[in-house]
Amino acid sequence: MSADFLAVPSASNPPEKENMANQPDFVPGLAGIPCAQSRVCFIDGSQGILQYRGFPIQDLAASCSFEETVHLLLFGALPDADALKAFKSELAEARALPDSVIATLRTLPKDGHPMDALTVAVSAMGMHFQGDHVKDEAFRRSCAIHLVAKLPTIVTSWHRVRQGLDPVAPRADLGHAANFLYMLEGEAPDELAAEVVDVALTLHAEHSMNASTFTGRVTASTLSDPFASVASAIGSLAGPLHGGANERVLETLRAIPDTSAEGVQKWAEERLANKDKIMGFGHRVYKVKDPRATILQGLATKMFKKLGPTPIYDVATRLETAMEALVGAKGIYPNVDFYSGIVYEKLGIPTDLFTPVFAIARVSGWLAHQLEQLDGNRIFRPSQIYIGDRDQKIQA
Ligand code: COA
């Protein structure tokens, strides 16, 4: 067979005019097309406003733990003191993994990406939770709790297993963020490290109809179970244009040969002239600086005061200044990924775990959307604009 079957219509090979008649407009990337009515998250990208269920992200980051944020996202309200205590212990009790899931992790190639290990383990976990999540509300709630509780255990267990170490069993007396850091290294973290991860998780917990949330909602709309919905969302988050960007920001910053202000400016000019995408900048929704990037930058400086400066942070701020002058007018500013990698690296989190940390947080948003999708569900089934040939005859 010739490679012609791969040919796609282009300016020099346009589709037949008649095929395009009476067709709706094609919107690449579904940009700006609403696909749900949602109460979970509000964003005003022109003003840099982000709210979870009506609460500004700045207030949640300053005053609420990640567990409170998860409660808000999943159940629609911040918990009172008693409800929070009960919710935290429910999460803590659900942290351990079935032995068979750990055994599955041990079979995977040790040089594989942690996001792939996460997908495998979440799918395997689903086999331990069989039931009717659509009709049984208590079961659905239990699946959600187990998913939020177990993702950090999967990520840290994988990280240990791939190094030939035994996983560290979770500690029920630690909060979600502190326990994650504990399971990673086997040592309880100090207060600042736990606080920084807690805030970072809150900042990444939810972000309306992004690619992974949309993916998860599409899967949920077929009435697939929450584990399948989350596994598909993880696959979507892994890509470099979405959650995978945070890993690449550090690579980008390290690739700048001359890190003086002039050198950084020149490097950015060359990249932009070359039409390269600079990781950690730009957003489909925000046309100003992502409010989460501002909060993360504050966390970074707080850490540097205690742990000492990180030269790469200075390169980052120079790049931000250069980019603002070069493409600020186009609405291209730092997004959430720009400073998160710098923060995680300072905490000693390995680079290829940055996106899994994103998933540990975002699972709460995915599940909030999954629950919302089931309420008055209609299966997603967009249309397409067919631009191929028609009525072809097979040559004898
Ligand atoms: N660096 C340089 N230019 C960028 C840019 C970036 N990071 N992001 C967008 N642009 C430019 C594009 O080149 C394009 O310019 P043009 O109009 O001259 O062709 C314009 O801005 C629009 O870009 P587009 O890719 O169409 O925007 P989008 O809304 O489809 O994409 C992202 C949004 C996030 C995928 C995109 O900004 C990107 O790839 N950023 C880098 C990856 C990243 O950090 N992702 C994490 C997102 S939280």
Image (cartoon, rainbow, N blue to C red):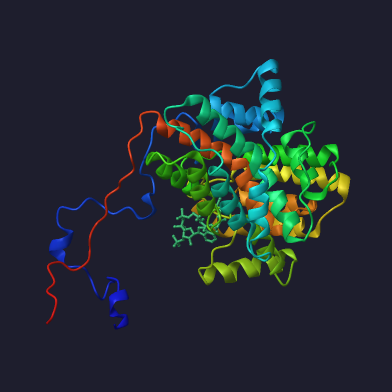
Q: Is residue 108 something that shows in the picture? A: yes
Residue 151, percent across and down? 64, 43
- The N terminus: image quadrant: bottom left
Quadrant assignment, res 327: bottom right
- Please name the residue shown 55% across and 31% down the image: 52
The number of numbered discs placed on residues in the rendered structure image is 0
- Please name the residue shown 59% across and 68% down the image: 269
Closer to the camera in the image, 165 or 233: 165
Q: Is residue 84 above or below residue 92?
A: above
- Please name the residue shown 15% across and 66% down the image: 390
Quadrant assignment, res 75: top right
Q: Is residue 204 something that shows in the picture? A: no
Residue 148, percent across and down? 62, 37
- The C terminus: image quadrant: bottom left
- Please name the residue shown 60% across and 32% down the image: 145
Specify whether 21 is left or right of 103: left
Residue 140, percent across and down? 50, 30
Specify whether 396 is left or right of 336: left
Q: Is residue 217 above or below residue 279?
A: above
Residue 315, percent across and down? 73, 60
